[in-house]
Image: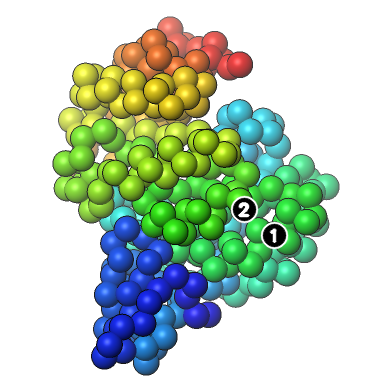
Amino acid sequence: MECALYDQEEGGICLCRLCPRRCRILPSQRGWCRTRWNDHGRLKALTYGLVTSAALDPIEKKPLAWFHPKSRILSLGSWGCSMNCLFCQNWEISQREEESRKVTPERILRLAEALTAQGNIGVAWTYNEPTLSFELIRDTAPLLHQAGLVNVMVTNGFIGEEALDLLLPLIDAWNIDLKGWDPLFYRSICGASREPVLKTIQKAQAVSHVELTNLVIPEENDDPETFEDMVRWIASLNKDMPLHITRFFPRWRMMNHPPTPVGTLVSLGNIARKYLSRVKIGNVSEEELAAHHWDNESSAG
């Protein structure tokens, strides 16, 4: 599939406009994300229609707690990512080219409709970075809308402004990872920049339902003062924007880091609740939360 967002330059070079990296890709080479390939001066999306992961998930697993709660959603993922977070929880598909099967927009629609009897409300583009499936979402999302189904985007938010503007009318709800507040954390741990993520959050929350996720990593992005600055910024946009504060477990290149102490999560959660009306702690059992005097439901509204 030819990519939608690129420019052709002299010497057969392609300038990709999908994400803020704006890769200049030489003939027969790939972009940084590995999913864009220069085929003799035409940029091709290598992952179009390729699905590595599919499941009918509870909507809360995205996580979306205030968007059609207690429903289910068909969740689809491919491979590749526009970041390379050292702590990636899905590194097997984000950082590798895993085995996949081919689907079409029409097949996705049929599957989504067939699953409505089991509570399905639409499709969540998730697991790896869904921005890299831009062309598939562009082709599939309108079909789902015509059938009365929804589109959900679970993303790192590192999206080019042009791509974001085209996605906004197609997406009904977003979960966006706000991985930290320190720009250095984004550069050194995630291999990306923070500002495009903030722009994505700003623009998406103005027109769609948005929930944010912050994965807290011990000694990396758990500083209370920095966290409070982040929460203040979120509240300046919308104090009712949900924030999921999530427990880290050792993964990929951060196997030497311990899991986040539950006490740290609760402490940060209490800071967040000074500014935000909807705060939940994730990846922790209700028993552990109760032992630390935290009630996820107390912020429901």
Q: Residue at x 17, y 47 (%)?
A: 188
Circle on res. 177: none
* Up-down relation of residue 72 to residue 282 (above or below): below
Looking at the rendered image, the quarter that the C terminus falls into is: top right
Look at label 1 and name its amino acid.
Pro
Q: How far, Cα to Cα, is label 2 from label 1?
A: 7 Å
Q: Is mark 1 on a helix, strand or loop?
A: helix
The percent coordinates of residue 161 (x first, y second) are 41, 54
* Up-down relation of residue 12 to residue 92 (above or below): below
Q: Residue at x 27, y 87 (%)?
A: 10
Circle on res. 142: 1
* Up-down relation of residue 22 to residue 61 (above or below): below
The percent coordinates of residue 248 (x first, y second) are 33, 35
55 vs 191, left or right, is: right
Q: Is mark 2 on a helix, strand or loop?
A: loop
Question: Counting other residues with Cα less than 10 Å from the Cα at mark 1, is it few (<14), some (14-19), or many (20 or more)?
Answer: some
- The quarter holding residue 217 reads top left
289 vs 61, left or right, is: left
Contact check, label 2 and label 1, Cβ < 8 Å? yes
Q: Nearer the viewer, residue 236 or 115?
A: 236
Q: Name the residue under label 2.
A: 170
| Picture mark count | 2
The percent coordinates of residue 164 (x first, y second) are 47, 53
